[in-house]
Image (spheres, rainbow, N blue to C red):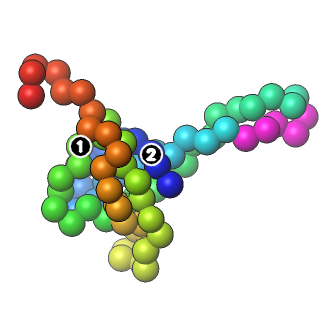
Amino acid sequence: MVGRVASDKMDKTVVVEVVRYKLDPVYRKYVRARTRYKAHDEKNEYRVGDRVEIVEHRPLSREKRWKVARLVERAEREGGQ
């Protein structure tokens, strides 16, 4: 799955927000549904706003069952960094 890093405040963990569109059964319109996953980031290299790909992994903690596979796109940084 591909999503954006929403938080990188934890050690070796990032929160990845995956947005997908699903059809509403009553109104027959596509609505945005988001899910947040905690994913393992061994080197603390991903920052808020980065687009990353996550893959399923064995349980690493109570809520962490995903691992960051690769960086898809780096986020634009303010201040020329």
Q: Position of residue 26 (x, y in %)?
A: 90, 34
Q: Residue at x 31, y 65 (%)?
A: 40
Q: Position of residue 72 (x, y in %)?
A: 35, 45
Q: Residue at x 44, y 65 (%)?
A: 55
- Answer left or right for 80 relative to 62: left
- Answer left or right for 73 relative to 43: right
Mark linked to residue 3: 2
- Answer left or right for 80 relative to 22: left
Q: Does residue 63 appear in the picture of this structure?
A: no
- Three-letter amino acid code of the residue under disc 2: Gly
User: Is the residue 52 above or below the residue 57 in the image?
Assistant: above
Closest to the observer, 24 or 69: 69
Q: What residue did someone put label 1 on? A: 47
Residue range of the region highlighted in magenta in the rendering: 22-26
**Regarding mark 1 in the picture, which secondary structure is present there?**
loop
Residue 24 within the segment the image draws in magenta? yes
Q: Position of residue 21 (x, y in %)?
A: 67, 38
- 3D distance between C-alphas at marks 1 and 2: 13 Å
User: Is the residue 58 above or below the residue 78 in the image?
Assistant: below
- Answer left or right for 40 relative to 58: left
Q: Position of residue 79 (x, y in %)?
A: 10, 20
- Three-letter amino acid code of the residue under disc 1: Arg
